[in-house]
Amino acid sequence: MEVYPFTSRDQLMRYADEHKGIMVAINAEKILNATEQTRAVINRNIGYCDGTGAVMALKQKGYKDVCKIAGCELWLEIIRQFHASRTFYLVGSKPAVIKETVEKLHAQFPDIKIIGYRDGYLKTPEEKEALLNDIYVKKPDIVFVAMGSPKQELLMEEMQKRHQAIYQGLGGSFDVYTGHVERAPKWWLDNNLEFAYRLIRQPKRIGRQIHLVRFAWWLVIKKFK
């Protein structure tokens, strides 16, 4: 699996801007659960470290200056930098949440140019085709897709075939932005314990996160070296 060893958020943003690629967040869970399909998607695009586990794995490979870049912060930084000069298209989440996201962005950035948006529930091939055509016609500079992996990456690849732009997959970031899902407080983030906070808040995640023990063992035995 190829993950780019970016040393800053700005470096990643510049690279994505120059190459008009799809930014794919990589964490320990994605590395553990990688399939032939998801690994190929990551290798075709711009994988970046969105979790401490991914950072530690790359450091074992010798990339000492690689840093964690939180995707749920990255998309807002992109908007802060380019809201007055670029056009945006948003896809994902429930109808009420995407509408609330767009309204909040307009309130926070009055001059933002959102030229299209829709929820993430593409129920028929016709709905997906309509979305792809809308992307082709409107030609946004930056597209955010919040649908979960690998669904969002596969959709962005189809979009990219119609129109070259900067793409970023956001998972549940619209829900976090609008306050429907609470992100971990700063102390937990600063101490790389966001996963633990989410587990405390959502105990049902234990079935997914128990596998992180295996990833920790991989780090101990220097599997990534």
Image (cartoon, rainbow, N blue to C red):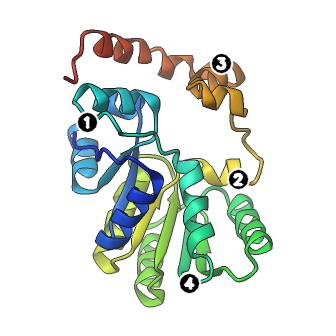
Q: Which mark is residue 85?
A: 4
| Residue at 33% over, 77% down | 164
Element under disc 1: loop
Percent across and percent down for residue 193 are 59, 23
Q: Is residue 120 visible?
A: no
Question: Which residue is under mark 1?
Answer: 35
The furthest residue to the right: 107
Among the two numbered marks 2 and 4 on one chain, the one whose residue lies closer to the N terminus: 4
Compared with 145, 36 (above or below) is above
In the image, 201 versus 122, the foreground residue is 201
**Distance between mark 2 and mark 1 Cα atoms:** 30 Å
From the viewer's perspective, is the residue at label 2 or at label 1 nearer? 2
In the image, 210 versus 130, the foreground residue is 210
The furthest residue to the front: 65
Among the two numbered marks 3 and 2 on one chain, the one whose residue lies closer to the N terminus: 2
Q: How many numbered badges does the structure rendering display?
A: 4
| Residue at 61% over, 76% down | 83
Among the two numbered marks 2 and 1 on one chain, the one whose residue lies closer to the N terminus: 1
Question: Which residue is under mark 2?
Answer: 177
Q: Amino acid at mark 2?
A: Tyr
Compared with 68, 170 (above or below) is below
In the image, 81 versus 134, the foreground residue is 81
Q: Which mark is residue 203?
A: 3
How dense is the environment of label 4, judged by Cα within 10 Å: few (below 14), some, or many (20 and up)?
A: few
From the viewer's perspective, is the residue at label 2 or at label 4 nearer? 4
Q: Amino acid at mark 1?
A: Thr
Q: Amino acid at mark 3?
A: Pro
**Distance between mark 4 and mark 3 Cα atoms:** 43 Å
Q: Are marks 1 and 3 in contact (CB under 8 Å)?
A: no
